[in-house]
Amino acid sequence: MRVSNLKGELKRLVTVLLQEIDDWPATGLLIAATNHADLLDPAVWRRFEMRVEFPMPTDAAVRRAVDIFLGATKAPAAWTDVLAVTLRDLSFSDIEREVMLARRAAITRDIPIEDALGQVVQNRVEPLPRRERGQIAMWLTEAGISQRQVHELTGVSRDTIRKKTKAVGEAPEGEE
């Protein structure tokens, strides 16, 4: 599809959305949600009396969510930390999807849950630029995961992990 056709289709979609909102009964309650507020036309926002934004989960909330979504799964406790670090920039629904996919994979492929969870980490880390993989490697190290396991999960060399860990340990307080 050509870009001009796509823009025209988007304008038609916005027009339909605006008409539907305008036709909503005055006695009714309309609740809408989006993960891409920045993509909506400002005319859409003017039609709502109230806007509530939900921030992304905190690290502690991600950790609790991972615990809840793992449920009775017999995964070592360290995996909660690994997943909490790896999934820290996701919404609760995305975290749930990732953990549930791993649980299903462990059952359907008859593999240890640790292998399925490791695949989640690798899938999330693999497409990232080297610098971001390095940051996740540091977070995993700080979470108490061994350098060998961090290397296996992120692809960051153990030498690099060792150097970064040493550099952080030598940084003056407050300059990490």
Image (cartoon, rainbow, N blue to C red):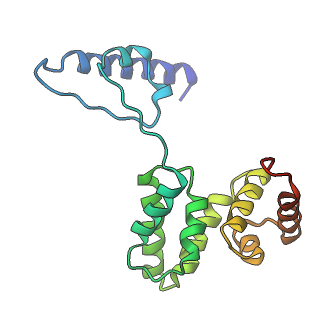
Decide if residue 125 is on the left or right side of residue 130: left
Which of these two is toward me, 127 or 118?
Answer: 118
**Residue 5 on image: x %, y %:** 50, 21
Residue depicted at x 43% and y 60%: 97
Determine the image quadrant of residue 40: top left
Above or below — where is 95 with respect to 100?
above
Q: Position of residue 1 (x, y in %)?
A: 53, 29
Where is residue 101? Give x, y as percent.
45, 67
Residue at 26% from the left image edge and 16% from the top image edge: 19
Farthest residue, direction front: 173
The residue shown at (47%, 86%) is: 110
Left or right: 21 with respect to 163?
Answer: left
Number of marks in picture: 0
Q: Is residue 112 above or below residue 123?
A: below
Q: Is residue 108 left or right of residue 79?
A: left
**Picture quarter containing residue 23?**
top left
Q: Position of residue 75 (x, y in %)?
A: 50, 80
Q: Residue at coordinates 42% horizontally, 38% vertically from top-left?
A: 54
Q: Nearer the viewer, residue 119 or 87?
A: 87
Q: Residue furthest left?
A: 27
The quadrant in which residue 87 appears is bottom right
